[in-house]
Amino acid sequence: MATNRKEPLTASPPEQALIDRIALQERQITEALAQYEPLSATLAWFDTLRAIEEWINLITVDWGDESFENTLLSLPVAGVTGGHSHLEGVRQRLEAKFGKNFGIRFTKLLIQGASIATAFTRHGFGDVAQGFQTVGTMVGYLQSRRRHFVGLLHMLPTACRGRNVVNPLDTLNVFLPIIELTAVEMIGAQNALLVRLARARLGLAELESAELAMLDSLFLEPERARITEMPMTEKGIEMLELREALLPDRIFSAAELRNDILAIEAHYAEFNLADTDFAPAAALVRRLSIAFVQRDFWIAISPAELAALCDEFGVSPVLRSALVHTAPEYMACLSTYAPFVLVGGVYRSTVTLLSRFVYHWRAQSLDRQKRFQIRAGFIFEEAVAAELEQQGFVVQGITRITRREFDVVALRAGVIWNVQCKNNFVDLERIEADAERFARFNRMLVRAYERALTKERAREHLLKAKLSLDTIQHVVVSRFPVVCDNPRIVPFSRIGNFVATADRLVAESADS
């Protein structure tokens, strides 16, 4: 019998063990941070986070020199403190393009990476140390932990309450073991709990191998319609002509932040962002990037000044609360997009944190619009169709037969693939830390998708007649990272392996 969705599930012993483990790891993180002095810890981590962001974005730089790019990404990290024949050449090339301070930050992080890799190897964590073999592998590692790095920043001002001063040259040695050996493990336990409760809510047996396909490629969270997926209108193209010229000697700048805002407004111009809560957020961030920026990267503003700006731009209470994160738990810190951290009585941020926030706030402002939801649904269908075409499916131009609508119809090896694209979405920030809520939402979606598959089977004769083929398969692709055992319900984060899923479904159908 299905579980009443309004009643909390009673935790089984394995689930309770996960709950207890998560609580223990939360305490361990808090206790580990408690020995450090908050001001030095937060400011040192701010500096390290800047270097990390620069490293991650190195792969986006057009060097115009493939040989140098290969040299840069293949530069060894381990043993770099002993010197390396290519390091000096790489450093000089970086400084020539981005300045001496950039080269210093790059080298400092490289040395820290070498040091922490040695420590991880010495203590038996060779799998983690593998991420620090070369600059290229270290970039990938840093990208995979980006969310943790920002989450830690929000926790430091309150969790650190001791006297141990953090040296800016020692931040990875201090904080990375906490992240890697406790925080990452805690998130793994939380994801396992989400899966267990979701399966229990569906009446499915426990399955140790079950996973949660939470993130899309490049460790990005799912969203209705990414800026890269939005087609530009003529109005949007005209708006982009107002972009500011960027100085070539920096990866990040206040001007780039303002261009990021303009790009959002241009790509989503058809949805009148000026009439949403995005407008005051954009105005606020633009002012911050002009009047409160330091060295073209840092943002510093007093609480009184920030409150005055919020009053000036008519910032709503919801938007005000989104600017600063206050919950002390690490799990909650991981989910926030708040750009500001209160350090020594001053709110501090960076152009990258503000860019991250304003992009997230765009989704918050648009996702409630019915017109955007419909438009995003069509864009999602196009994204699914493009993925199928890359894997050898021949997408048909069929969208309607006798007033019956279809999302994506494709052919492969004499089989019709009728793919329903479900852009159902809820901000993971709201449910990821709440396993019960996740389980309820997951069950609602799975049941709806199962009904959709039944509906498609009832009208499959229309596609068979239209395409003069007798074999058809029905699949639902879900934007939300749904948990279930139905192979015909595919999370979009796993669409890259759709051809394997298709082959398995065809084989199972032949055997039945």
Image (cartoon, rainbow, N blue to C red):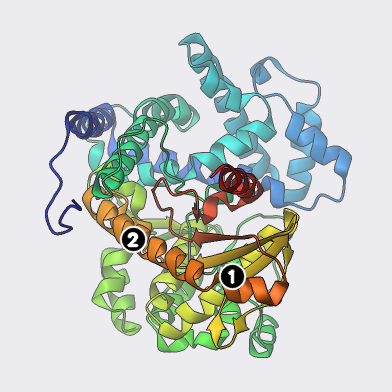
Between 169 and 20, the one nearer to me in the picture: 20
Secondary structure under tag 1 reads helix
Asked if one can make out residue 291 in the rendered structure from this viewpoint, the answer is no
Q: Which mark is residue 156?
A: none
**Residue drawn at x 38%, y 66% as measured from the top left:** 451
Amino acid type at circle 2 is Arg
Question: In front: mark 1 or mark 2?
Answer: 2
Badge 1 or badge 2: first in the primary sequence = 1
Residue 287 in the image, given as x and y percentages of width and height? 46, 75
47 lies left or right of 325: right
Residue named by callout 2 = 447
Asked if one can make out residue 39 in the rendered structure from this viewpoint, the answer is yes
78 lies left or right of 50: right
Residue 72 in the image, given as x and y percentages of width and height? 76, 35
Q: Which mark is residue 381?
A: 1
Q: Are marks 1 and 2 in contact (CB under 8 Å)?
A: no
Secondary structure under tag 2 reads helix
**Residue 227 location, quadrant:** bottom right
93 lies left or right of 5: right
**How many C-alpha atoms fall within 10 Å of the one at disc 1: few (<14), some, or many (≥20)?**
some
Between 5 and 404, the one nearer to me in the picture: 404
